[in-house]
Amino acid sequence: MNHSIKYLIVFLISLGFKPSNAQLTISAGPGASFFLIGSQGITSDYWRYTSRPAPASQLYEPPAYNFWADYKLSKRSAVGLAACYQYFNFLPNIVYDSLQRRMTVSRLNIAGRYLYYYNRKDTTSSYIPYLGVRVGLSFWKGAAAPGTYPFTFYSSLSKKSWILPSVQGFWGFRCYPFTNVKNLGLNCELGIGTPYFVEAGLVYRFQKPN
């Protein structure tokens, strides 16, 4: 995994980009993804299995937690590393199911990303739109209590662990509306692929002195 990310960064740098007003940008924030389709599938199948309404089980599904850091190579491009973590807990109600075969499923995505800033000659401005691509690996882990239920989602997600490749294309923007803290801003991204379809958060840029 480490070698793959290293090769990706070396490849992007080798394309001929030269640093210009070097700038490191970091961001953290929540996001939403289709990861939760699995949890909803388990819940729906379980309701049909027990012939009970929603209180038959408890499902805890927080949003995806995202972090990324990008380094600007030129006025038009940047490369970076990103991580996204998400999980859900499924717990049947003991009134309807004495076995309580609880399940926890988590996914950690680690990837390299490339950004292209379009329609901007100066990426130090207050509004910065961009296009990007993200390539990496998703590390899945499933932990389930002994025993199985006779439906697809439970059996397919109760594996110990597995690794899958991930690819994502995205559009996003950053804005810096705070006059008192000019390097603190907001960001938003819309993506197709893994690990999210929308994410937003705070962003901070470290600029090289002129």
Image (cartoon, rainbow, N blue to C red):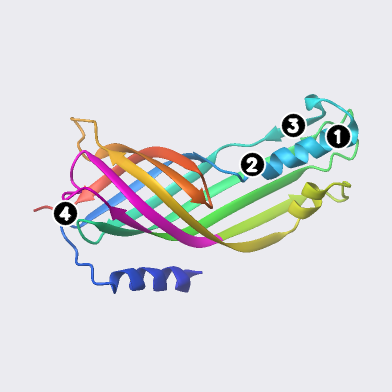
Residue 41 occupies quadrant: top right
What numbered label is drawn on residue 192? Answer: none
Question: 5 or 40, which lies in front?
Answer: 40
Instruction: Return the x and y of residue 89 as percentages of the image width and height.
Output: 70, 40
Instruction: Return the x and y of residue 190 as percentages of the image width and height.
Output: 44, 43
Task: Looking at the image, tell me whether mark 2 or mark 3 is earlier in sequence order.
Answer: 2
Q: CA distance from mark 1 to mark 4?
A: 59 Å
Residue type at mark 2 is Leu
Task: Tell me what residue is drawn at x 58 percent, y 46 percent.
Answer: 86
Instruction: Return the x and y of residue 139 as percentages of the image width and height.
Output: 60, 59
What numbered label is drawn on residue 208? Answer: 4
Q: Main secondary structure of the magenta part?
A: strand
Q: CA distance from mark 1 to mark 3?
A: 15 Å
What numbered label is drawn on residue 58? Answer: 3
Task: Looking at the image, tell me whether mark 1 or mark 4 is earlier in sequence order.
Answer: 1
Question: 48 or 95, which lies in front?
Answer: 48
Q: Which residue is mark 2?
A: 36
